[in-house]
Image (tube, rainbow, N blue to C red):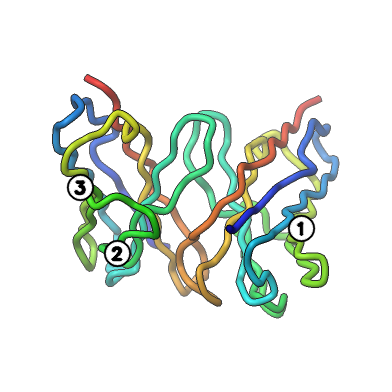
Amino acid sequence: EIVLTQSPATLSLSPGERATLSCRASQSVSSYLAWYQQKPGQAPRLLIYDASNRATGIPARFSGSGSGTDFTLTISSLEPEDFAVYYCQQRSNWPFLFTFGPGTKVDIK
Amino acid sequence: QVQLVESGGGVVQPGGSLRLSCAASGFTFSSYGMHWVRQAPGKGLEWVAFIRYDGSNKYYADSVKGRFTISRDNSKNTLYLQMNSLRAEDTAVYYCAKDPTGEEYYFDYWGQGTLVTVSS
């Protein structure tokens, strides 16, 4: 089973600053990694798929990179609405299951 | 636009049963795989189950295998989760989520969730 680790657990930044979030897989997932944003009381929203492709309607300030075991989500300049929890996610084929990282909370400094 | 609306949550005693529904609209439901994902209060996301577009393949997390059953009715554009032998640790918001193609590895749309509380 592939385990995803996210760091840091919490990132305290100010609006306008750059956010860099990390996701590490216990074994290679190629580029099959997605990122989600979740705000309090809301469902998760897909941000990035295939490690670097922005989902429909996602602003260009969000970008993803990486392959294999190390991935990064970057928010180039934080907007007030970007303060939320971010999860990475992948699927393993054997066993067939989907796993999420524990999340990184981006809060206002 | 894509809409997923869950229903059926509530309070149930340990050992009890509950059936969740997810009504889909805005896309051709019968062409896409569907998932259930849950989130315990204050915790992270946990995938629960997946069903292929035609219902031919189903997969479950170990934590629910043998107790939960995912199904779908493509004529009613509805996804279901039958939950039996419920435990306190099943308490969570349950989301239905759509697969972007047939059997992808991620989820492109999510419902707003329905809360299941298992308590005596």
Q: Which of A21 and A15 is in front in this view?
A: A15
Residue lying at 52% horizontally and 74% vertically, measured from the top left: B101
Residue in the picture at 76% in, 44% down: B7
Name the mark on residue B80: 1
Q: In this view, does A85 lie above or below B74?
A: above
Secondary element type, mark 1: strand
Q: How far apart are marks 1 and 3 (CA)?
A: 36 Å
| The furthest residue to the front | B1
| Crowd class of label 3 (few under 14; some 14 to 19; many from 20; radius 10 Å) | some
The correct choice, above or below, for A37 with respect to B67 in the image is: above
Both labels 1 and 2 in a single chain = no
The percent coordinates of residue B21 (x first, y second) are 77, 52
Which quadrant would the N terminus of chain A be assigned to in this image? bottom left
The residue to which callout 3 is attached is A74
Report the residue marked by disc 2. A53
Label 2 secondary element? strand
Indicate the position of residue B119 as horizontal and vertical percent values. 76, 27
Q: Please name the amino acid that badge 3 sits on.
A: Thr
Residue sitting at x 37%, y 36%: A85
Residue B81: where, in percent of width, then height?
75, 55
Mark 3 belongs to chain: A
x and y percentages locating residue A2 in the rendered image: 38, 61
What chain is tagged by disc 1? B
The amino acid pointed to by label 1 is Tyr
Image-based side of B101 in relation to A87, left or right:
right
Image point (28%, 63%), residue name = A51
**Circle 3: element type:** strand
- Quadrant hosting residue B28: bottom right
Q: What residue type is labelled 2?
A: Asn
In this view, the residue in front, B48 or A87, is A87
Query: Which label's residue is closer to the chain start, 3 or 2?
Result: 2
Q: Can residue B119 be seen in this view?
A: yes
